[in-house]
Amino acid sequence: MNIGVPKEIKKHEYRVGMTPHCVRTYTSHGHTVLFEAGAGLGSGYTDEEYERNGAKLVPDAQQVFDRSEMIVKVKEPLPAEYELMKEGQLLYTYLHLAANRELVQALLDRKVTSIAYETIELPDHSLPCLTPMSEIAGRLSVQEGAKYLEKAYGGRGILLGGVPGVPRGNVAILGGGVVGTNACKIAVGIGANVTILDVNARRLAYLDDIFGSSITTLYATEANVEFVLQEADILIGAVLLPGESTPKLIRKEHLKRMKPGAVLVDVAIDQGGCAETSRPTTHDQPIYIVDDVVHYCVANMPGAVARSSTIALTSVTLSYGLLIADLGLENALRNHSPIRAGLNTFQGMCTHQGVARSCGLTYSRLP
């Protein structure tokens, strides 16, 4: 199979779809990897490293798309890339289609087959290709929240860990999944007062066992959400419904109950965000303020630590991409349920129920 790796063009996106090691693995299986020159530089990989491992360098994205049967990326195609996609081509990347109706329509119109990293699902309902980026985003959420809590950025001027004789800061985390758990680790490590909310009693029991008296666990009822946001210096949105739009747990009127200068870090922004006032931001303009609450809603948080993120991401996406390339798409879909779960569009049809529901489309089940 001819497999293409274009350079990411999303603003301040420095990750890349393959490391040189990935290229060597694909080529050792008899596949051809067409790699856009310079695509790996943001993650610290030179063109020479890719060539040594068997990649064929091409000068631009147009040639990558023209000559490839499967495109391996990190982030969703932007409008400038829509015209590069062709009928029957396979797109393997993060897509987050529930919050991007325009991209869904482009994929359907061009009859592009898409497999989304974030909806590849194992029998135990874990999401192996989403997990490493969720881990990184969760850890970054506290780091970034602490930064923008500083007075110079419009924050309350609170040191999360405090010092002797000074109260610690309060961190509230909505969602106890991978993002929330990793945010919890960092917040506890810094020394903040941490409260984590979830709707799953078993998950709360697990978190209570792991962190013990270092945290407070609460059911995510509306009353509890309203209570913690009034006390929070940093509020982290870590809610996920796989493949679907994120529910708006934080309404605009809630902001008036929050402390002036508190920080909302909406990690769920890729799926639409869990606050009504959230909108995607970029690393060069990461924050904005609504009703005295600082909003941090960067849609590609792990891109800031591109080297670590690229290694973590490709370590898990490689095996599924290799299965598709080795078996061919139809055999991979027929024989591998996680890949089948990752299928979002196919021959002009929307094949993921959550995406179809969120975007108001007809859901088409594969035979």
Image: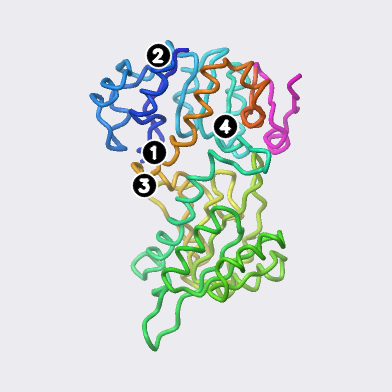
The answer to whether the residue labelled 2 contacts the one labelled 3, judged by CB atoms less than 8 Å apart, is no
CA distance for labels 1 and 3: 11 Å
For the residues marked 2 and 1, what is the alpha-carbon distance in whole angstroms? 21 Å
Q: Which mark is residue 116?
A: 4
Q: Position of residue 169 (x, y in %)?
A: 46, 75
Q: Residue at x 38, y 50 (%)?
A: 285
| Helix, strand or loop status at disc 3 | helix
Q: Amino acid at mark 2?
A: Thr
Q: Are marks 4 and 3 in contact (CB under 8 Å)?
A: no
Q: CA distance from mark 4 to mark 3?
A: 21 Å
The boundaries of the magenta stretch are 347-367
Counting residues from the start of the chain, the first of labels 4 and 1 encountered is: 4
Tell me how far mark 2 sits from mark 3, CA to CA: 30 Å
For label 2, the residue is 32
Looking at the image, tell me whether mark 2 or mark 3 is earlier in sequence order. Answer: 2
N-terminal label among 2 and 1: 2
- Circle 2 sits in a helix, a strand or a loop, which is it? strand
Q: Position of residue 33 (x, y in %)?
A: 39, 17
- Which tag is nearer the camera, tag 1 or tag 3? 1
Left or right: residue 62 compared with residue 177: left
Query: Which comes before the other along the chain, label 4 or label 3?
Result: 4
Q: Are marks 4 and 1 in contact (CB under 8 Å)?
A: no
Nearer to us in this view, 112 or 53: 53
Q: Residues within 10 Å of mark 2 (few under 14, many from 20)?
A: some
Mark 2 or mark 4, which has the lower sequence index? 2
Q: Is residue 16 above or below residue 197?
A: above
Residue beneath disc 3? 304
At label 3, the amino acid type is Ala
